[in-house]
Protein backbone atom coordinates (compact mmCIF):
# COMPACT_ATOMS: atom_id res chain seq x y z
CA UNK A 1 0.00 0.00 0.00
CA UNK A 2 1.34 3.43 -0.89
CA UNK A 3 2.04 5.61 2.12
CA UNK A 4 -0.16 8.64 2.59
CA UNK A 5 2.95 10.72 2.90
CA UNK A 6 4.54 9.17 -0.24
CA UNK A 7 4.65 12.47 -2.19
CA UNK A 8 7.87 13.74 -0.68
CA UNK A 9 9.83 10.51 -1.07
CA UNK A 10 11.76 9.18 -4.03
CA UNK A 11 11.72 5.58 -2.88
CA UNK A 12 9.64 3.31 -0.71
CA UNK A 13 10.31 2.64 2.95
CA UNK A 14 12.58 -0.32 3.59
CA UNK A 15 10.54 -3.38 4.56
CA UNK A 16 12.24 -3.95 7.90
CA UNK A 17 11.98 -0.28 8.73
CA UNK A 18 8.33 -0.34 7.74
CA UNK A 19 7.58 -3.22 10.08
CA UNK A 20 9.54 -1.52 12.84
CA UNK A 21 7.67 1.74 12.39
CA UNK A 22 4.21 0.25 12.15
CA UNK A 23 1.93 0.22 15.18
CA UNK A 24 -1.26 -1.24 13.76
CA UNK A 25 -0.69 -4.62 15.40
CA UNK A 26 -1.26 -2.99 18.78
CA UNK A 27 -3.11 0.27 18.13
CA UNK A 28 -5.87 -1.44 16.14
CA UNK A 29 -7.72 -1.79 19.42
CA UNK A 30 -8.30 1.99 19.24
CA UNK A 31 -10.52 1.60 16.16
CA UNK A 32 -13.81 2.40 17.88
CA UNK A 33 -12.45 5.49 19.58
CA UNK A 34 -10.66 6.59 16.42
CA UNK A 35 -13.93 6.43 14.49
CA UNK A 36 -15.86 8.15 17.29
CA UNK A 37 -13.32 11.00 17.22
CA UNK A 38 -13.47 11.25 13.44
CA UNK A 39 -17.27 11.41 13.46
CA UNK A 40 -17.20 14.33 15.91
CA UNK A 41 -14.42 16.03 13.93
CA UNK A 42 -16.34 15.66 10.66
CA UNK A 43 -19.56 17.00 12.20
CA UNK A 44 -17.65 20.06 13.40
CA UNK A 45 -15.98 20.54 9.98
CA UNK A 46 -19.45 20.69 8.49
CA UNK A 47 -20.71 23.13 11.15
CA UNK A 48 -17.91 25.56 10.33
CA UNK A 49 -18.43 25.22 6.58
CA UNK A 50 -15.42 23.07 5.66
CA UNK A 51 -17.45 20.01 4.64
CA UNK A 52 -20.70 20.13 2.68
CA UNK A 53 -23.74 18.29 4.02
CA UNK A 54 -23.22 15.69 1.34
CA UNK A 55 -19.58 15.15 2.22
CA UNK A 56 -20.49 14.84 5.87
CA UNK A 57 -23.14 12.25 5.19
CA UNK A 58 -20.74 10.24 3.01
CA UNK A 59 -18.13 10.32 5.78
CA UNK A 60 -20.61 9.51 8.53
CA UNK A 61 -22.11 6.61 6.65
CA UNK A 62 -18.71 5.36 5.50
CA UNK A 63 -17.23 5.43 8.99
CA UNK A 64 -20.36 3.83 10.42
CA UNK A 65 -20.07 0.95 7.99
CA UNK A 66 -16.37 0.50 8.65
CA UNK A 67 -17.13 0.35 12.36
CA UNK A 68 -19.92 -2.20 11.91
CA UNK A 69 -17.83 -4.38 9.66
CA UNK A 70 -14.88 -4.29 12.04
CA UNK A 71 -17.18 -5.25 14.93
CA UNK A 72 -18.72 -8.08 12.88
CA UNK A 73 -15.32 -9.22 11.67
CA UNK A 74 -16.25 -8.84 7.99
CA UNK A 75 -13.55 -6.18 7.61
CA UNK A 76 -10.10 -7.10 8.87
CA UNK A 77 -7.25 -4.78 9.73
CA UNK A 78 -4.69 -4.30 7.01
CA UNK A 79 -1.50 -5.16 8.88
CA UNK A 80 0.45 -3.23 6.22
CA UNK A 81 -1.22 0.01 7.22
CA UNK A 82 1.10 2.14 9.33
CA UNK A 83 -1.34 2.60 12.19
CA UNK A 84 -5.02 2.56 13.01
CA UNK A 85 -5.51 6.18 11.94
CA UNK A 86 -4.03 5.60 8.48
CA UNK A 87 -5.99 2.38 8.14
CA UNK A 88 -9.38 3.93 8.85
CA UNK A 89 -8.73 6.96 6.66
CA UNK A 90 -7.45 4.87 3.76
CA UNK A 91 -10.37 2.47 4.03
CA UNK A 92 -12.81 5.39 4.07
CA UNK A 93 -11.23 7.03 1.05
CA UNK A 94 -11.22 3.72 -0.79
CA UNK A 95 -14.98 3.61 -0.26
CA UNK A 96 -16.12 7.22 -0.69
CA UNK A 97 -13.35 8.91 -2.69
CA UNK A 98 -12.53 12.62 -2.33
CA UNK A 99 -14.82 13.28 0.65
CA UNK A 100 -12.66 10.82 2.60
CA UNK A 101 -9.57 12.83 1.74
CA UNK A 102 -11.12 15.89 3.36
CA UNK A 103 -11.60 14.27 6.77
CA UNK A 104 -8.07 15.03 7.91
CA UNK A 105 -8.51 18.80 7.32
CA UNK A 106 -7.34 20.78 10.39
CA UNK A 107 -6.16 17.61 12.06
CA UNK A 108 -2.89 15.74 12.49
CA UNK A 109 -2.28 12.22 13.66
CA UNK A 110 -0.57 13.87 16.59
CA UNK A 111 -3.76 15.31 18.03
CA UNK A 112 -5.77 12.39 16.67
CA UNK A 113 -3.79 9.78 18.59
CA UNK A 114 -3.77 11.98 21.68
CA UNK A 115 -7.57 12.12 21.44
CA UNK A 116 -8.03 8.42 20.73
CA UNK A 117 -5.93 7.31 23.65
CA UNK A 118 -7.76 9.62 26.05
CA UNK A 119 -11.12 8.36 24.84
CA UNK A 120 -9.98 4.76 25.09
CA UNK A 121 -8.42 5.12 28.52
CA UNK A 122 -11.45 6.97 29.85
CA UNK A 123 -13.55 3.90 29.03
CA UNK A 124 -10.97 1.49 30.37
CA UNK A 125 -10.61 3.49 33.57
CA UNK A 126 -14.32 3.22 34.15
CA UNK A 127 -14.17 -0.55 33.57
CA UNK A 128 -11.36 -0.90 36.09
CA UNK A 129 -13.43 1.10 38.60
CA UNK A 130 -16.38 -1.23 37.97
CA UNK A 131 -14.18 -4.25 38.65
CA UNK A 132 -12.85 -2.66 41.81
CA UNK A 133 -16.42 -2.15 42.97
CA UNK A 134 -17.17 -5.83 42.37
CA UNK A 135 -14.06 -6.81 44.28
CA UNK A 136 -15.13 -4.63 47.19
CA UNK A 137 -18.55 -6.33 47.05
CA UNK A 138 -16.84 -9.72 47.29
CA UNK A 139 -14.79 -8.58 50.27
CA UNK A 140 -17.89 -7.16 51.96
CA UNK A 141 -19.72 -10.44 51.37
CA UNK A 142 -17.03 -12.41 53.18
CA UNK A 143 -16.57 -9.72 55.84
CA UNK A 144 -20.26 -9.62 56.69
CA UNK A 145 -20.31 -13.38 57.16
CA UNK A 146 -17.28 -13.15 59.45
CA UNK A 147 -18.10 -10.26 61.73
CA UNK A 148 -17.33 -12.42 64.75
CA UNK A 149 -14.61 -14.63 63.32
CA UNK A 150 -11.63 -14.01 65.55
CA UNK A 151 -8.14 -14.35 64.13
CA UNK A 152 -4.69 -13.18 65.16
CA UNK A 153 -3.68 -9.79 63.84
CA UNK A 154 0.02 -9.65 63.00
CA UNK A 155 2.90 -7.25 63.01
CA UNK A 156 6.26 -8.50 61.73
CA UNK A 157 4.25 -11.63 60.89
CA UNK A 158 4.28 -12.31 64.65
CA UNK A 159 0.96 -12.73 66.41
CA UNK A 160 0.12 -9.31 67.82
CA UNK A 161 -3.48 -8.72 68.92
CA UNK A 162 -6.78 -10.45 68.20
CA UNK A 163 -8.89 -8.96 65.43
CA UNK A 164 -11.84 -10.16 63.40
CA UNK A 165 -11.42 -11.61 59.95
CA UNK A 166 -13.96 -9.01 58.84
CA UNK A 167 -11.80 -6.18 60.19
CA UNK A 168 -8.83 -7.53 58.27
CA UNK A 169 -10.79 -7.73 55.02
CA UNK A 170 -12.22 -4.26 55.55
CA UNK A 171 -8.66 -2.90 55.50
CA UNK A 172 -8.50 -4.06 51.87
CA UNK A 173 -11.87 -2.47 51.16
CA UNK A 174 -10.41 0.87 52.26
CA UNK A 175 -7.43 0.43 49.91
CA UNK A 176 -9.64 -0.43 46.97
CA UNK A 177 -11.99 2.50 47.60
CA UNK A 178 -8.93 4.79 47.52
CA UNK A 179 -7.88 3.12 44.27
CA UNK A 180 -11.21 4.08 42.75
CA UNK A 181 -10.86 7.70 43.82
CA UNK A 182 -7.31 7.79 42.47
CA UNK A 183 -8.54 6.71 39.05
CA UNK A 184 -11.40 9.19 39.20
CA UNK A 185 -8.94 11.98 40.02
CA UNK A 186 -6.74 11.06 37.07
CA UNK A 187 -9.74 10.93 34.75
CA UNK A 188 -10.88 14.35 35.95
CA UNK A 189 -7.50 15.82 34.98
CA UNK A 190 -7.26 14.05 31.65
CA UNK A 191 -10.78 14.80 30.49
CA UNK A 192 -9.82 17.67 28.16
CA UNK A 193 -9.86 17.32 24.40
CA UNK A 194 -6.53 17.75 22.61
CA UNK A 195 -8.20 17.67 19.17
CA UNK A 196 -7.56 20.84 17.22
CA UNK A 197 -4.00 21.11 18.53
CA UNK A 198 -3.29 19.71 15.08
CA UNK A 199 0.39 18.87 14.45
CA UNK A 200 1.58 21.12 17.32
CA UNK A 201 0.70 24.74 16.60
CA UNK A 202 -3.03 24.74 16.05
CA UNK A 203 -4.61 25.36 12.66
CA UNK A 204 -5.44 28.13 10.21
CA UNK A 205 -8.91 26.65 9.68
CA UNK A 206 -11.89 28.14 11.56
CA UNK A 207 -12.48 25.07 13.75
CA UNK A 208 -14.68 24.82 16.83
CA UNK A 209 -12.71 22.79 19.35
CA UNK A 210 -15.24 23.28 22.12
CA UNK A 211 -18.03 21.75 20.07
CA UNK A 212 -15.96 18.61 19.42
CA UNK A 213 -14.97 18.43 23.08
CA UNK A 214 -18.57 18.69 24.18
CA UNK A 215 -19.78 16.11 21.69
CA UNK A 216 -17.17 13.68 23.01
CA UNK A 217 -18.00 14.23 26.67
CA UNK A 218 -14.91 16.21 27.63
CA UNK A 219 -14.96 18.94 30.26
CA UNK A 220 -13.19 21.33 27.92
CA UNK A 221 -10.21 21.62 25.57
CA UNK A 222 -6.49 21.53 26.29
CA UNK A 223 -5.28 25.12 26.57
CA UNK A 224 -1.96 24.86 24.73
CA UNK A 225 -1.60 23.07 21.41
CA UNK A 226 1.98 21.95 22.08
CA UNK A 227 0.94 20.48 25.43
CA UNK A 228 -2.15 19.05 23.76
CA UNK A 229 -0.11 16.74 21.55
CA UNK A 230 2.77 16.11 23.97
CA UNK A 231 0.95 15.35 27.19
CA UNK A 232 0.94 11.76 28.36
CA UNK A 233 0.66 12.59 32.06
CA UNK A 234 -2.63 10.75 32.17
CA UNK A 235 -0.90 7.54 31.06
CA UNK A 236 1.57 7.88 33.90
CA UNK A 237 -1.14 8.76 36.40
CA UNK A 238 -3.32 5.83 35.40
CA UNK A 239 -0.36 3.45 35.38
CA UNK A 240 0.57 4.71 38.83
CA UNK A 241 -3.00 4.15 40.01
CA UNK A 242 -2.97 0.68 38.44
CA UNK A 243 0.38 -0.03 40.09
CA UNK A 244 -1.12 0.71 43.47
CA UNK A 245 -4.07 -1.55 42.73
CA UNK A 246 -1.53 -4.25 41.95
CA UNK A 247 0.36 -3.49 45.16
CA UNK A 248 -2.85 -4.00 47.12
CA UNK A 249 -3.78 -7.14 45.21
CA UNK A 250 -0.28 -8.45 45.69
CA UNK A 251 -0.36 -7.95 49.46
CA UNK A 252 -3.71 -9.71 49.62
CA UNK A 253 -2.30 -12.45 47.39
CA UNK A 254 0.60 -12.94 49.74
CA UNK A 255 -1.79 -13.29 52.67
CA UNK A 256 -4.03 -15.70 50.81
CA UNK A 257 -0.98 -17.79 49.92
CA UNK A 258 0.09 -17.85 53.58
CA UNK A 259 -3.44 -18.47 54.84
CA UNK A 260 -3.98 -21.44 52.55
CA UNK A 261 -0.69 -23.10 53.55
CA UNK A 262 -0.82 -25.99 56.03
CA UNK A 263 1.21 -23.83 58.39
CA UNK A 264 -1.76 -21.46 58.72
CA UNK A 265 -4.80 -23.11 57.10
CA UNK A 266 -6.97 -20.07 57.81
CA UNK A 267 -8.77 -20.30 54.49
CA UNK A 268 -9.56 -22.93 51.94
CA UNK A 269 -9.68 -21.63 48.38
CA UNK A 270 -12.34 -23.03 46.12
CA UNK A 271 -11.08 -25.81 43.86
CA UNK A 272 -12.04 -23.69 40.87
CA UNK A 273 -9.30 -21.19 41.74
CA UNK A 274 -6.48 -23.55 42.59
CA UNK A 275 -4.35 -25.99 40.63
CA UNK A 276 -2.63 -29.30 41.21
CA UNK A 277 0.87 -30.57 40.72
CA UNK A 278 2.13 -32.78 37.90
CA UNK A 279 3.95 -35.05 40.35
CA UNK A 280 2.69 -34.51 43.92
CA UNK A 281 -0.83 -35.92 44.16
CA UNK A 282 -1.70 -34.07 47.36
CA UNK A 283 -1.00 -30.55 46.12
CA UNK A 284 -3.53 -27.77 45.87
CA UNK A 285 -1.72 -24.61 44.91
CA UNK A 286 -2.90 -20.99 45.09
CA UNK A 287 -1.65 -20.22 41.57
CA UNK A 288 -4.07 -17.35 40.93
CA UNK A 289 -2.82 -15.43 43.94
CA UNK A 290 0.79 -16.19 43.03
CA UNK A 291 0.28 -15.01 39.47
CA UNK A 292 -1.32 -11.80 40.62
CA UNK A 293 1.60 -11.22 42.98
CA UNK A 294 3.95 -11.89 40.06
CA UNK A 295 2.09 -9.72 37.56
CA UNK A 296 2.56 -6.76 39.84
CA UNK A 297 6.05 -6.49 38.36
CA UNK A 298 4.69 -6.08 34.84
CA UNK A 299 2.51 -3.16 35.79
CA UNK A 300 5.31 -1.42 37.70
CA UNK A 301 7.43 -2.04 34.59
CA UNK A 302 4.82 -0.41 32.37
CA UNK A 303 4.81 2.66 34.62
CA UNK A 304 8.61 2.86 34.51
CA UNK A 305 8.65 2.33 30.75
CA UNK A 306 6.29 5.24 30.17
CA UNK A 307 8.11 7.57 32.54
CA UNK A 308 11.39 6.71 30.85
CA UNK A 309 10.01 7.22 27.34
CA UNK A 310 8.79 10.67 28.30
CA UNK A 311 11.73 11.98 30.28
CA UNK A 312 14.05 12.84 27.42
CA UNK A 313 11.87 13.87 24.53
CA UNK A 314 11.71 17.46 23.37
CA UNK A 315 8.36 19.08 22.62
CA UNK A 316 6.19 18.41 20.74
CA UNK A 317 5.35 14.98 19.23
CA UNK A 318 8.16 12.47 18.76
CA UNK A 319 7.77 8.92 17.53
CA UNK A 320 9.02 7.68 20.90
CA UNK A 321 5.51 8.44 22.09
CA UNK A 322 4.11 5.54 20.08
CA UNK A 323 5.68 3.43 22.85
CA UNK A 324 3.08 4.76 25.30
CA UNK A 325 0.44 2.38 24.01
CA UNK A 326 1.84 -1.09 24.55
CA UNK A 327 2.76 -0.09 28.10
CA UNK A 328 -0.62 1.30 29.05
CA UNK A 329 -2.51 -1.45 27.23
CA UNK A 330 -0.50 -4.07 29.06
CA UNK A 331 -1.01 -2.35 32.41
CA UNK A 332 -4.75 -2.05 31.79
CA UNK A 333 -5.19 -5.61 30.54
CA UNK A 334 -3.15 -6.99 33.40
CA UNK A 335 -4.98 -5.15 36.15
CA UNK A 336 -8.35 -6.12 34.66
CA UNK A 337 -7.43 -9.80 34.37
CA UNK A 338 -6.14 -9.84 37.94
CA UNK A 339 -9.31 -8.23 39.25
CA UNK A 340 -11.50 -10.57 37.20
CA UNK A 341 -9.96 -13.64 38.78
CA UNK A 342 -9.82 -12.15 42.28
CA UNK A 343 -13.50 -11.20 42.48
CA UNK A 344 -14.83 -14.79 42.43
CA UNK A 345 -11.81 -16.24 44.20
CA UNK A 346 -12.44 -14.05 47.24
CA UNK A 347 -16.17 -14.64 47.18
CA UNK A 348 -15.80 -18.41 47.14
CA UNK A 349 -13.02 -18.83 49.68
CA UNK A 350 -13.93 -20.55 52.93
CA UNK A 351 -12.50 -19.17 56.16
CA UNK A 352 -11.59 -21.93 58.61
CA UNK A 353 -12.71 -20.26 61.80
CA UNK A 354 -11.46 -22.95 64.22
CA UNK A 355 -7.92 -22.64 62.93
CA UNK A 356 -7.96 -18.88 63.19
CA UNK A 357 -9.28 -19.14 66.73
CA UNK A 358 -6.79 -21.83 67.69
CA UNK A 359 -3.95 -19.65 66.40
CA UNK A 360 -5.08 -16.90 68.78
CA UNK A 361 -4.58 -19.21 71.74
CA UNK A 362 -0.80 -19.24 71.35
CA UNK A 363 1.37 -16.19 71.07
CA UNK A 364 0.10 -14.10 74.01
CA UNK A 365 -1.99 -11.91 71.77
CA UNK A 366 -3.98 -10.72 74.80
CA UNK A 367 -0.88 -9.36 76.55
CA UNK A 368 -1.68 -5.74 75.63
CA UNK A 369 -5.14 -6.20 77.09
CA UNK A 370 -3.66 -7.43 80.34
CA UNK A 371 -1.43 -4.35 80.50
CA UNK A 372 -4.48 -2.18 79.70
CA UNK A 373 -6.31 -3.92 82.58
CA UNK A 374 -3.63 -2.84 85.05
CA UNK A 375 -3.51 0.63 83.51
CA UNK A 376 -7.26 1.04 84.01
CA UNK A 377 -6.67 0.17 87.66
CA UNK A 378 -4.19 3.01 88.06
CA UNK A 379 -0.82 1.51 87.23
CA UNK A 380 1.21 3.68 84.82
CA UNK A 381 1.22 2.02 81.38
CA UNK A 382 5.01 1.54 81.24
CA UNK A 383 4.97 -0.26 84.61
CA UNK A 384 2.01 -2.38 83.52
CA UNK A 385 3.80 -3.19 80.28
CA UNK A 386 6.84 -4.40 82.22
CA UNK A 387 4.75 -6.43 84.68
CA UNK A 388 3.02 -8.26 81.84
CA UNK A 389 6.32 -8.74 80.04
CA UNK A 390 7.66 -10.50 83.14
CA UNK A 391 4.55 -12.70 83.18
CA UNK A 392 4.94 -13.59 79.52
CA UNK A 393 8.57 -14.56 80.09
CA UNK A 394 7.44 -16.79 82.96
CA UNK A 395 4.73 -18.37 80.78
CA UNK A 396 7.22 -19.03 77.98
CA UNK A 397 9.49 -20.77 80.50
CA UNK A 398 6.68 -22.89 81.89
CA UNK A 399 4.93 -23.55 78.59
CA UNK A 400 1.73 -21.84 79.75
CA UNK A 401 -0.68 -19.25 78.41
CA UNK A 402 -1.74 -16.14 80.33
CA UNK A 403 -5.08 -17.62 81.33
CA UNK A 404 -3.37 -20.69 82.79
CA UNK A 405 -1.62 -18.67 85.51
CA UNK A 406 -3.33 -18.75 88.90
CA UNK A 407 -4.66 -15.61 90.55
CA UNK A 408 -2.23 -16.14 93.43
CA UNK A 409 0.68 -15.99 91.02
CA UNK A 410 -0.78 -12.88 89.42
CA UNK A 411 -1.11 -11.23 92.80
CA UNK A 412 2.56 -11.89 93.54
CA UNK A 413 3.33 -9.41 90.79
CA UNK A 414 0.62 -6.88 91.55
CA UNK A 415 -2.23 -6.63 94.06
CA UNK A 416 -4.27 -4.88 91.34
CA UNK A 417 -5.01 -8.23 89.69
CA UNK A 418 -8.48 -9.62 90.54
CA UNK A 419 -10.53 -12.61 89.45
CA UNK A 420 -12.13 -10.57 86.62
CA UNK A 421 -8.83 -10.43 84.76
CA UNK A 422 -9.52 -13.79 83.10
CA UNK A 423 -12.70 -12.50 81.58
CA UNK A 424 -10.98 -9.27 80.52
CA UNK A 425 -8.34 -11.12 78.52
CA UNK A 426 -10.71 -13.51 76.79
CA UNK A 427 -10.29 -13.19 73.03
CA UNK A 428 -13.89 -12.06 72.56
CA UNK A 429 -13.43 -9.25 75.07
CA UNK A 430 -10.10 -8.20 73.60
CA UNK A 431 -11.92 -7.65 70.32
CA UNK A 432 -15.13 -6.22 71.76
CA UNK A 433 -13.29 -3.63 73.83
CA UNK A 434 -11.39 -2.12 70.93
CA UNK A 435 -14.10 0.48 70.56
CA UNK A 436 -11.89 3.30 69.31
CA UNK A 437 -12.92 4.67 65.95
CA UNK A 438 -11.59 2.39 63.21
CA UNK A 439 -10.63 -0.31 65.74
CA UNK A 440 -11.51 -3.97 65.49
CA UNK A 441 -14.47 -3.67 67.92
CA UNK A 442 -17.80 -4.91 66.56
CA UNK A 443 -19.42 -1.46 66.55
CA UNK A 444 -16.52 0.06 64.64
CA UNK A 445 -16.80 -2.74 62.12
CA UNK A 446 -20.44 -1.89 61.47
CA UNK A 447 -19.38 1.71 60.86
CA UNK A 448 -16.73 0.60 58.37
CA UNK A 449 -19.14 -1.59 56.45
CA UNK A 450 -21.65 1.24 56.37
CA UNK A 451 -18.98 3.65 55.12
CA UNK A 452 -17.93 1.34 52.28
CA UNK A 453 -21.54 0.57 51.35
CA UNK A 454 -22.19 4.32 51.20
CA UNK A 455 -19.11 4.78 49.02
CA UNK A 456 -20.37 2.16 46.56
CA UNK A 457 -23.68 4.01 46.20
N1 LIG B 1 1.04 5.74 15.47
C1 LIG B 1 1.43 7.01 15.97
C2 LIG B 1 1.52 6.98 17.49
O1 LIG B 1 1.00 6.09 18.04
C3 LIG B 1 0.44 8.06 15.57
C4 LIG B 1 0.99 9.44 15.52
C5 LIG B 1 1.98 9.54 14.43
N2 LIG B 1 2.37 10.89 14.16
C6 LIG B 1 3.40 11.17 13.39
N3 LIG B 1 3.66 12.41 13.18
N4 LIG B 1 4.15 10.24 12.88
O2 LIG B 1 2.12 7.80 18.10
Image (cartoon, grey):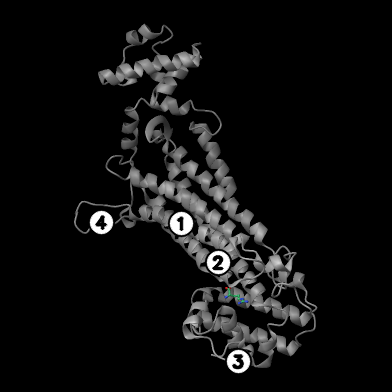
**Left or right of 274: which side holds 375?**
right
Residue tagged by mark 4?
276
Q: In the image, is the residue at mark 4 within 8 Å of ligand 1 by its beta carbon? A: no
Q: In the image, is the residue at mark 2 within 8 Å of ligand 1 by its beta carbon? A: yes
Q: Position of residue 275 (x, y in %)?
A: 29, 57
Cα distance, mark 1 to mark 2? 23 Å
- Can you tell me which quadrant of the image ligand 1 is in? bottom right
Cα distance, mark 4 to mark 2? 38 Å
Q: Position of residue 130 (x, y in %)?
A: 54, 58
**Above/below status of 9 relative to 435:** below
4 and 2 marks in contact (CB < 8 Å): no
Marking on residue 324: 2
Cα distance, mark 1 to mark 4? 22 Å
Cα distance, mark 2 to mark 3? 31 Å
Instruction: Answer with mark 4 or mark 2, whichever residue precedes in sequence.
Output: 4
Describe the element under mark 4 as helix, strand or loop.
loop
Residue closer to the observer: 440 or 256: 256
Residue tagged by mark 3?
95
**Left or right of 405: which side holds 248?**
right
Marking on residue 104: none
Instruction: Answer with mark 2 or mark 3, whichever residue precedes in sequence.
Output: 3
Instruction: Answer with mark 3 or mark 4, whichever residue precedes in sequence.
Output: 3
Amino acid sequence: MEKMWAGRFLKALDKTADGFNSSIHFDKRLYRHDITGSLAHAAMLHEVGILTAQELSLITEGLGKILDELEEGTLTFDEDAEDIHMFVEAELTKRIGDAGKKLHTARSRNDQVALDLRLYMRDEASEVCGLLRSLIESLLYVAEANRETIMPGYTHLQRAQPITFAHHLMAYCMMFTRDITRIEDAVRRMNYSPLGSSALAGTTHPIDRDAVAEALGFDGVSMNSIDGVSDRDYCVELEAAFSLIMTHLSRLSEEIILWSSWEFKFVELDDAYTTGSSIMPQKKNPDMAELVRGKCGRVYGDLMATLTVLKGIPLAYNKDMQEDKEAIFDATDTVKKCLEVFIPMIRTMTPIKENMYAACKRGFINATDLADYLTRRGMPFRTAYKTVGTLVARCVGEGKTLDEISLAEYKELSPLFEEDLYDEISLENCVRKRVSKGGTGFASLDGQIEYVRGFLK
